[in-house]
Image (cartoon, helix red, strand yellow):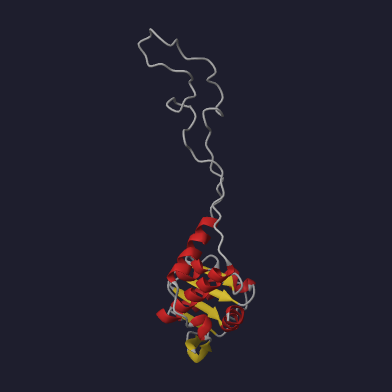
Amino acid sequence: MAQVQVYNQEGRKTSKLELADSVFGIKPNESAMHLAVVSYLANQRQGTQSTLTRSEVSGGGAKPWRQKGTGRARQGSTRSPQWTHGGVALGPKPRKYKVNLNKKVKKLAIKSALSSKVAAGEMMVLNKVELEEIKTKVMVEILAKLKAAKKTLIVTNEVDEKVYKSARNIEGVKVVTANTICVYDILNCDSFIVLKDAAKKIEEVYA
């Protein structure tokens, strides 16, 4: 069983939590994680960029000057790509960048990312976070006591408005729920903080 240190919000070690090797102790599959990251980044692209071709630019109906005898290069339209305000040749058009992964690869990638964080000692389990009110200053103090890195991912079991709103203005800190974690977020953080009940939920879902 993979073991992870459990802390309280004061930054003190309280116990150790045993996690299933089938989720947090497998040999990371780099290929699956790479595919998951590529898929995530590609799916963030809107694909709405667009340029006008020569047929879509207004004007240019008349031939600028006669074909021969002027000493200038022959031209058929002022909306050709070489003209200022002309159409764009081979420019981008709206398209979909979506990359689909099958469920087995997604599951393997998540488990690989979780296992890599445990192996690197970058995952810590937090007993619970108790905030009396939404206060960024208090959350900064909690992260400082936990010696969290600048890029930190906090995983809660369910949507916790106090935790989310207290952390959203802290640069480099992101809060997600156990059912919305993705491989990119896990690999992109230097400190991976998971609440105890969220760790159990992840274990149940991916075991």
Q: How many marks?
A: 0
Q: Residue furthest top?
A: 69
Instruction: Report if residue 61 is visible in the image.
Output: yes
Q: Residue 119: x and y, percent?
A: 42, 81
116 to 65, vertically: above or below: below
Location of the C terminus by quadrant is: bottom right
Q: Residue at x 55, y 63 (%)?
A: 101
Q: Residue at x 56, y 60 (%)?
A: 100
Q: Residue 94: x and y, percent?
A: 56, 43
60 to 110, vertically: above or below: above
Q: Residue furthest bottom?
A: 15
Q: Residue 60: x and y, percent?
A: 52, 20
Q: Residue furthest left?
A: 71
Q: Residue 104: x and y, percent?
A: 56, 71
Q: Residue at x 50, y 81 (%)?
A: 24
In-front residue for pair 43/4: 43
Q: Residue at x 47, y 81 (%)?
A: 26
In-front residue for pair 23/199: 23
Instruction: Report if residue 188 is visible in the image.
Output: no
